[in-house]
Amino acid sequence: MKVAEKVREFVKKRPYISEALENNIVNMSELARIIESELRIHSAEATKAAIRRYAVEVRRSRRRREEAVLRLLQASKLIVLDNLSIVVTSKDFEIANKMKIKLSDLNYVYLVEKSLLREVRAKVKPNLRHVHEDCTALTVISPEQMETTPGVVAYLTSLLSAQDVHSLAFASCYTETTFVVERSDALTSYQIMSQIIG
């Protein structure tokens, strides 16, 4: 395998290095030494040259990917549903819900209106595993290109996590992406997302 191929494979398996290359915040000489040591390459110049070439590729690719993600999100809509609770049961139930996900044969997750929580608890009581109250759901409704545009979900989750917003539940399918957050994080989440969406 050529040095360039080895370098490419090394970086692809380490997304944090790829991201540093994308942002042009890498000490190329030090990275070359690390790669040479780990891959037992004996040509510092060839390794550095391979890193530089790959960094250019990665930056171009990131720019195209990010532009596509931003175009898609600008064509999307944001819906906020408040006063919700997450209910996790060990058995499937017919209950009024905003969302239901079967995680496995062990857990079913429901997003229910807080006003219905007492009724839901009574109905599922012996099979109740967990309840998380005071939640808000933020749903991004995107064009159909959502299914073929890589990086949309990663972009949104990184925006939220950069502001210390934790997603209690998350689902993305077809054109809808829903983040369920603590009600105390709802305003921050809305502000972050609404600057990009729509």
Image (cartoon, rainbow, N blue to C red):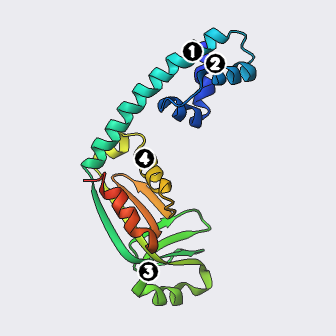
- Residue 108 versus residue 167: which sits nearer the camera? 167
Q: Of label 1 and label 3, which has the lower sequence position?
A: 1
Pointer 1: what residue? 50
As measured in the structure, the alpha-carbon distance from the residue carrying label 4 to the one carrying label 1 is 28 Å
> In the drawing, what numbered circle is on residue 6?
2
In the rendered image, the vertical position of residue 192 relative to residue 69, given as above or below = below
Classify mark 2: residues with Cα within 10 Å, few (<14), some (14-19) or many (20+). some
- Residue 171 versus residue 9: which sits nearer the camera? 9
Are the residues tagged 1 and 2 within 8 Å (C-beta)? yes
Give the amino acid at mark 3: Ile
As measured in the structure, the alpha-carbon distance from the residue carrying label 2 to the one carrying label 4 is 28 Å
Give the SS element for disc 2.
helix
Are the residues tagged 2 and 4 within 8 Å (C-beta)? no
As measured in the structure, the alpha-carbon distance from the residue carrying label 1 to the one carrying label 3 is 57 Å
Pointer 4: what residue? 155
Is 149 on the left-hand or right-hand side of 117?
A: left
- Front: mark 1 or 3: 1
Is 192 on the left-hand or right-hand side of 12?
A: left
As measured in the structure, the alpha-carbon distance from the residue carrying label 4 to the one carrying label 3 is 33 Å
Give the SS element for disc 3.
loop
Residue 192 visible from this viewpoint = yes
Is 174 on the left-hand or right-hand side of 157?
A: left
> In the drawing, what numbered circle is on residue 95?
3
